Image: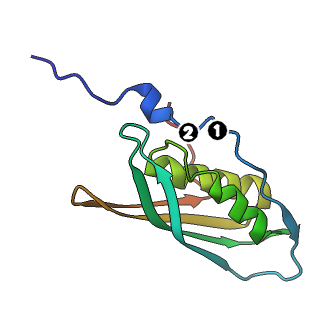
Amino acid sequence: MSKTSRYTADHAKAGLDANFPEIETWPNQFPGYEIVVDVPEFTSVCPKTALPDFGVLVIRYVPNKLCLELKSLKEYLLAYRNLGIFQENIVNQVLEDVVRYARPVSAEVEGDFRPRGGIATRVIARWPRPRGKRAK
């Protein structure tokens, strides 16, 4: 007897096609330092159950020529508040957008999501990423 998954490919991709606001940047003045942005009240929604997800998001990056403008970053992150998206996709999408706008030397995004049903999740994504194709 085969078991059918309750999660579909549409659930897996949920939220990744959202129209996120652009993250503004400003010219960096110094080489060789790290910026850490702590987001202690991050919220989103589970794409399957529509229940809220709460967590702490930490964005770390070594700027090259550009730094992320924080008000703009806040507006970007608020776009996740009512968005149905898996926690793993949040972390990876935020990383991709940080890299797209700031073009840093390196970056890391960590999501530490609060327990729901007795399970907490911590997801960490880093750039540069290992070479290879993105999962489809």
Q: Seen in the image, is 128 located left or right of residue 105? A: left
The answer, for residue 130, to whether it is visible in the render is no
Identify the residue at image location x=21%, y=60%: 118
Location of residue 113 in the rendering, given as x and y in whole percent from the top left corner: 40, 63
Q: Is residue 9 above or below residue 25?
A: above
Rendered image quadrant of residue 58: bottom right
Disc sitting over residue 56 in the figure: none
Number of the label disc, if any, that sits on residue 15: 2
Give the side of residue 75 with respect to residue 8, left or right. right
Q: Secondary structure at mark 1?
A: loop
Percent from the top left, x then y, of residue 71? 77, 68
Identify the residue under disc 1: 18
Q: Is residue 17 left or right of residue 13?
A: right
Q: Residue furthest top?
A: 1
For label 1, the crowd category at 10 Å Cα-Cα, with few meaning under 14, some 14 to 19 and many 20 or more, is: few
Q: Quadrant of residue 32?
A: bottom right
Is 94 located above or below residue 32 in the figure? above
Q: Let me know if residue 108 appears in the view.
A: yes
Quadrant including the N terminus? top left
